[in-house]
Amino acid sequence: MVARQSGTSARLVFAANVRKLRFERGLSQERLAELSDLHRTYVGSVERGERNISIDNMERLALALNARLRDIL
């Protein structure tokens, strides 16, 4: 997981960790979107740190990645 460094926003840490986990699990953005019941373009924008994502959608992604939300944050 990417650790939070001084000056790095929690949103960017979350984004990097989602992308890292997705790659590790061999999932496409489209497949992760299907598993989390989110749109593919939304998942992409989350991974780029462009979205101020809700805690509910964070939880959806964590569940789809079979990870604990606190570990992704």
Image (spheres, rainbow, N blue to C red):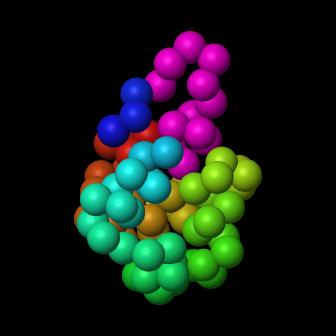
Q: How many labels sit on residues?
A: 0
| Highlighted magenta segment, given as a residue range | 4-15
Of 19 and 10, nearer the camera is 19
Q: Residue at x 45, y 65 (%)?
A: 61
Of 2 and 68, nearer the camera is 2
Against 43, is 10 above or below? above
Where is residue 36 drawn, in percent x and y?
46, 77
Where is residue 58 drawn, in percent x and y?
50, 58
Residue 13 is one of the magenta-drawn residues: yes
Does residue 54 appear anywhere in the picture? no
- The quadrant in which the N terminus is found is top left
- The quadrant in which the C terminus is found is top left
Of 16 and 63, nearer the camera is 16
Q: Relative to 49, is 19 on the left or the right? A: left
Q: What is the quadrant of residue 8 in the picture?
A: top right
Where is residue 25 drawn, in percent x and y?
27, 66
Q: Relative to 59, is 52 on the left or the right? A: right
Residue furthest out toward the top: 6
Q: What is the quadrant of residue 9 in the picture?
A: top right
Q: Residue at x 33, y 65 (%)?
A: 65
Against 68, is 32 above or below? below
Q: Residue at x 34, y 56 (%)?
A: 21
Does residue 5 appear anywhere in the picture? yes
Q: What is the quadrant of residue 63 in the picture?
A: bottom left
Residue 5 is one of the magenta-drawn residues: yes
Of 24 and 36, nearer the camera is 24
Against 43, is 9 above or below? above
